[in-house]
Amino acid sequence: MSEKSPAEQGIAAGTSMGAAVILVTVGIIQFFQGIAAVAENEVFVVGIDYTYKFDLTTWGWIHIVLGVVVAAIGVALFTGAGWARIAAIVIAAISIIANFMWLPYYPWWSVLIIALDVVVIWAVSTWKPQAV
């Protein structure tokens, strides 16, 4: 086949680093979101009764743990390790599910995190380290 051009190799490396930065950012955001939920149950207000309703303190701890794990995998993704790529896809998918369940409490923020997680999954799954 043909050799990759330097521009294509740069794009591949750029998307991987971009995914790592986004993953660390999402982890930090989720960590602080969890602290807000644990610190005071009055911060988040639910307007409508949804089918699934969970205790905010429990959700806060879930977001704190998830945020730490997401950020740690984002840092590991900077190394380019194969396991970090797989872990990034798995943890981003878990983050999507958690933020979907968090929609009744903070809808706009949850949609933003879901979108960022989708970008991470795309960037990590299309990155070809052998081309860099």
Image (spheres, helix red, strand yellow):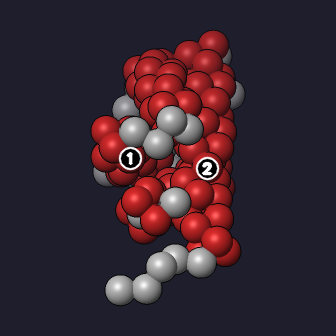
* Residue sitting at x 47%, y 42%: 80
Residue 120 visible to an observer of this rendering? yes
The amino acid type, in three-letter code, at marker 1 is Arg
- Residue 9 position within the rendered picture, expressed as x and y whole percent measured from the top left: 58, 67
Q: Quadrant of residue 28 in the image?
A: top right
Q: Which residue is mark 2?
A: 17
* Residue sitting at x 57%, y 44%: 20
Q: Nearer the viewer, residue 104 or 109?
A: 109
Q: Which residue is mark 1?
A: 85
- Label 1 and label 2: CA atoms lie apart by 11 Å
* Residue sitting at x 44%, y 26%: 69
- Residue 67 position within the rendered picture, expressed as x and y whole percent measured from the top left: 52, 29
Residue 63 visible to an observer of this rendering? no
Name, please, the residue furthest toward the bottom.
Answer: 1
Q: Nearer the viewer, residue 101 or 20?
A: 20
Query: Is 6 on the left or on the right of 77, as rendered?
Result: right
Q: Nearer the viewer, residue 79 or 120?
A: 79
Q: Secondary structure at mark 1?
A: helix
Name, please, the residue furthest toward the top.
Answer: 39
Q: Nearer the viewer, residue 5 or 125?
A: 5
Above-or-below relation of 14 to 83: below
Above-or-below relation of 87 to 8: above
- Residue 11 position within the rendered picture, expressed as x and y whole percent measured from the top left: 62, 68
